[in-house]
Every structure is written in structure tokens, then in C-alpha cells.
Amino acid sequence: MRFDSMRVVRPLALLALVLLPRLASAQEPEGVRLGLLYQPEYEPGFVVLPFSATAGAERAAGMVPGIIRQDLDYSDRVKVHEATGAVAGQPVNVALWKTRGADWVLDGALAPRPGGLALHVVLHDAVYGTTKADETFDLPPVGDPGFRMAVHALSDRVIRWVTGDPGMAATRIAFVLQGRGSKEIYLVDSDGENVQRITSDGSLALSPAWAPDGRHLAYTSYRSGRPMLYERDLQTGRDRLISDRQGLNITPAYSPDGRLIAFGTTVAGNTEVATYDRARSCCLAQQTHGRAFDSLSPSFSPDGSRFAFVSNRLGMPQIYVMPLGGEPQLVSEYATNGYNTAPDWSPRGPQLVYSSRIRGQHQILLQDLDKGTRRLLTNEGNNEDPSWAPDGRHVVFSSRDRDGGGLFVLDSVSGRIRPLLRGSGYALPAWSGVLYQLPGK
Amino acid sequence: MKLRNVAVLALVAVAFGACKKKQPPVAPTPAAPVDSAAIRAQQQARADSIAAAQRAAQEEAARQRAAAMARVRQELGSPVYFDYDSEQLSQEAQDKLRAKAEILQANPSLTIRVEGNADQRGTAEYNLALGQRRAESAKTFITQYGVSGDRITTISYGEERPVAEGTTEEAYSQNRRDEFAVTGGDITNLPGGGM
């Protein structure tokens, strides 16, 4: 099985855990001490049984458990066991599954309903022998564009039942892919399915950023001959112009309330972070005043009061945090030859991920702003442009040389890395918020 | 006497006859028009050869001018290169930019675009800013020579438009550059007042 083979990564991460701090301290310049540190948590065993189906729902029953199983595996919150020997529709022997390592057992039944399917799921707590949840949800029919997303939303609901935390299955990742002489923006579901091209400018399209509503994407395109900032409405397919200032209009980021778009733009020959009032379609406000230096790549804190950004005011690019209308503060570790770029602020707390150059290669660094700690999340190849999932735990990044290049999803807790899309020319991934939620709790 | 006289006359006659016989026949009068056509042809040939020489000279001048223009155009379009993560202008870069400033001064209708580029070692978004800084750096230098900033637009392609592929310093150094494109007007005057 695909998800079992992925587990091979884990012992390697543990090995790195043991070896790396020593290597790092031996070769790093003075003052830089970073370890690749993972503290794997206990992952409860989970079994997804085959779902039963009444006439007309067989095809869905053949697909849904597999999608959920993979989502749960990708969540890195549980250890998925095979439901070997299980028969759909048979009474569930929870005690038996418990002896096979399951802490949780999910059973389901699908039936057609007008306009789609009804999915009845039961989550058994095998440890306590109780029923954790027993609910029925409406799903679109198989083949409907929303079908897989609705199943992902069920996976997220299961994660919430089991852990109390939000999941990240019902999400998409926007990214840039190099074509023949052009770069276009695409979307892909969190499980690597359903790749969809969004732009066809035949030009350079860069730096997609998700609006909190999950319906709009801000991005830079050179289609007019120079870099301008646009916002795409994914439902209507229409664009509106956000900024066509002379020079750069790049690296957009939405404030969490969706009111502002912060971006990098040229002011008197320098790149500065400015905000555009999206709600009022006006009122550009310059946020940084670097004068002879550049400031770009903003990313807002979850409460929207502060933003992280990149500035080279000390020579090489470093990460700063500043309150809107306040003073910037250096947060990355200053080193003479340091190169820290592409910050992304966790939607769930005071954690930044960014790309940091270590021994000539770009690695993903996690910095806790409250604790003041920094942790290396990768240690081989070049790894760039990290973006948090809405669970505040997983990070998508691009690499041009890891396993032949592509987009990869990293679990910041276990250190597990899975490929999302493989190949050359993938860049600038941006993880959406949760795009679909099932009704109820 | 009479005989002598007759003989003399005969001699004279013979001599006359002989003389008359030797004399070339008088040409028919159209001789004059033939002569003027030849002259005209000669004149025409002379004029033609002068014109040809002039044309050749003009062509040669045009050729030289075209070559000079091509050199100037090439000089204007010639890229300027940078050190790693830097927009500082080297002596060579400054010399090239000074030559471009002179071309712009000599051709007041000419407008250009400076296109800043970075190598692939940095990260994509920061390299956009770096490319912009390189373009602005060249623009600032040229405007110091009295060329209006309105005539120079800047654009950054970051690391998106490499001219050399690969991960060698050789490739990187070719990609860290400003390119120069004419966006309006034309080069009609050579720098330094030459036409």
C-alpha cells in the first residue's frame, strides 16, 4: 500500500534526529545552532472498514473508504491499519479490531438520495468500547466536482472527533508550474488529485495567495508586459486588477479578515510592503519604509495585527515582524551571510516557517515567536517557499532537487515528508484554508 | 612653246587629275549629328561614372553609418553583469552604462526598458526584488548623465528568464544581468554629434 511504504521515511527522520545536531554544531558558523528535531507523538491505530451500500450507491462505497483511509494516513494523527478480512455490512467486532492494534474503528453505509448520496458513519472507540459518533451526511453524487471534497470534509470531521483538532484534507494547494516559455498557476487537492490549471496567460504568473473565503486568489502576472497584481474569482473565473504600479507588484498576502491585501511594490526604486483595502477597493497604504532597502513577502499573524516580511536592511535578506503601522523587529537569527526568505505565519499560532540558507542550501526552518526557538524541518536538498496548512501542523514546500523535484508535504510534528506532485518546474505553493465543511459539529 | 604649254597643261591636268583622284570623297553632311551623339554618350558616361562614384561613396558612407549604428545599437543592448546578490555596478558595468547614456543623449526620442535578472540560487520572490534593484541601479546611473528618468522604464524578471541553464558559477554569472530593450523612438544619431 502506498501509505505504508511512506512510513519508511520515519526511521530516517529519527536517525537524522540523532545525527544532525552534532553535524550542525560542527559546521555552522558561530552563533547558529540548529537541530533537526522531531518528537513523534503516539499515533492511535485506526481501521476504516469497507462501507456497505444499497442499490445505486455501490460505486461510491467502492471509493469513499479508500479516500478516507488515505486522508487519515496523510493527517499523520493516526496509524492506519488494513481492514483485512472485513466484510461490508457485517456487524462490527470492535474487540477483534482492538486486538489487531486499532484504537478507533470507522464503519459506514451509503445509500442513494435525490441529487446524491447519504452517508451514515459510525466511529467506534475501541479502547473504551463506546460509540464516539453516529451521524449521517449528504454527499454529492460520484462524478460531481464536489464529491471528493465532501469526502475529504468527512475525513476532517473524523480527525476532529478523534483529536479535537482541525484537519486539512478538504483543502487545495495553489502553485506555479513552469511550462514551455511560461509559468501558470494551478490548483491541486491536498491528496494530490484533481490538478486544475487556473491561468493561461502564456506569460509569467507567480505567487498565488488564498483569500480567507477560499474563493479568491491574488497573484502576480506579467501578461500585460510587466508584473501587475490581480485577484481571481475562482467561481466566476474573472480577474480584477489590484495594483498596476510602476515596477513590482508581487508577493500578495491576505489579512485573516480578508479586508487587506499586503504585497511588495516599488516605491522610489525600492520594494516596500503596502496594503490595499480590498473591501473598499482603494486606499493603498505604505507599511514599510526601508528607503534604500527592500521589503517584501508579507504574511499576517492569525489576529491580523502583525505581519512577517523579508527585508535586506542588514545586507542579506532576513525575517522581520511588525505591527500594522508599527516598527519592524528582526526575528531570524542574524548571520553575516544569512539568507532567510519566504516567511509564512501559521494560521493557528505564533509559528513562522521560512526558507533559510544553511551550508549553501535552502532549508525549511520553523521558528516559535513566543518561545524564541528555531527548528530545522528539512536537512537535504533545496527546500523553498513553505506554506502552512490550516491545521497549523503540515507545511507544503517546493524542491527542485529532492527526489527529482516537486511539491512536498511535511508534517512538522513527526518529520514525515510525502510527495504531493513530482517533477521539475513546481514552485511557490500556497495552502488554502478549509474549503468545505460538513454541516453539524 | 605651244607644245610645251600643252604639255604643262597636260601635266597640270594630270597632276590635277591625280590630285583630284587622291582627294577623299567629301562626306555627306550628316557627319555633324553623329559627332554630337558620341559626345553626349561620353558626357553621359562621365556623368554616370561620377554618379556611380558618388553612389558608391554614399553607399559606403551608408554602410559605414549602418555599421556604426549597428555598433551603437549593440552597445545600447549589451547586457550589464553583477556579482552575487548585488546591484553594485562594476567598473565595466559603469563604462557600458556611460556609453548607453551618450547614445540616449544623442537620440532624444529614444526610450528604453532596463530588465533586471537574478541567478537561480536565491529564492524566487526575493530574486524579483533583487532584479528590480539591479534595473533601478542602471537607471539611476544613466540618469546621472542628464538623461530624463521618464525615458527609462524598469522591469524585473527575477530568476524567471535565465539565459544560461545549469548550476555552475559560469551559468549563474551570465544570468545575473540587466538587459536593455528599445521601447520607443529610434537610433538616428551617433553619440558624440556624428550623423
Image (spheres, rainbow, N blue to C red):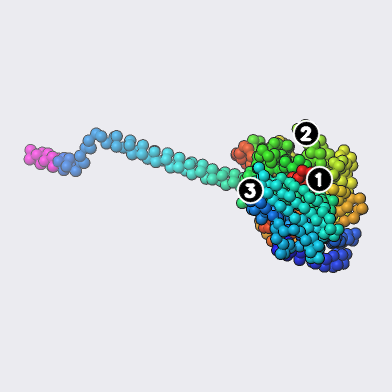
Quadrant holding the N terminus of chain A: bottom right
Nearer the observer: mark 2 or 3; the answer is 3
Nearer the observer: mark 3 or 1; the answer is 1
Q: Residue furthest right?
A: A371
Q: Earlier in the sequence, mark 3 or mark 1?
A: 3
Q: Earlier in the sequence, mark 2 or mark 3?
A: 3
Residue position for label 2? A279
Residue position for label 1? A441
Cβ–Cβ below 8 Å for labels 1 and 2?
no
Q: Are marks 1 and 2 on the same chain?
A: yes
Residue A139 percent across, percent down from the top left:
70, 46
**Three-letter amino acid code of the residue under disc 2:** Ala
* Alpha-carbon span between mark 3 and mark 1: 26 Å
* Alpha-carbon span between mark 2 and mark 3: 36 Å
Task: Please indicate, yes or no, whether residue A131 appears anywhere in the rendered image.
Answer: yes
Quadrant holding the C terminus of chain A: top right
The span picked out in magenta is B2-14
Q: Residue at x 85, y 44 (%)?
A: A302
**Depth check, front residue: B190 or A428:** A428
Q: Is label 1 in a helix, a strand or a loop? A: loop
The verdict on residue B8 being magenta is yes
* Left or right: A26 in relation to A245: right
Q: Residue at x 66, y 36 (%)?
A: B108
Residue A187 percent across, percent down from the top left:
69, 48
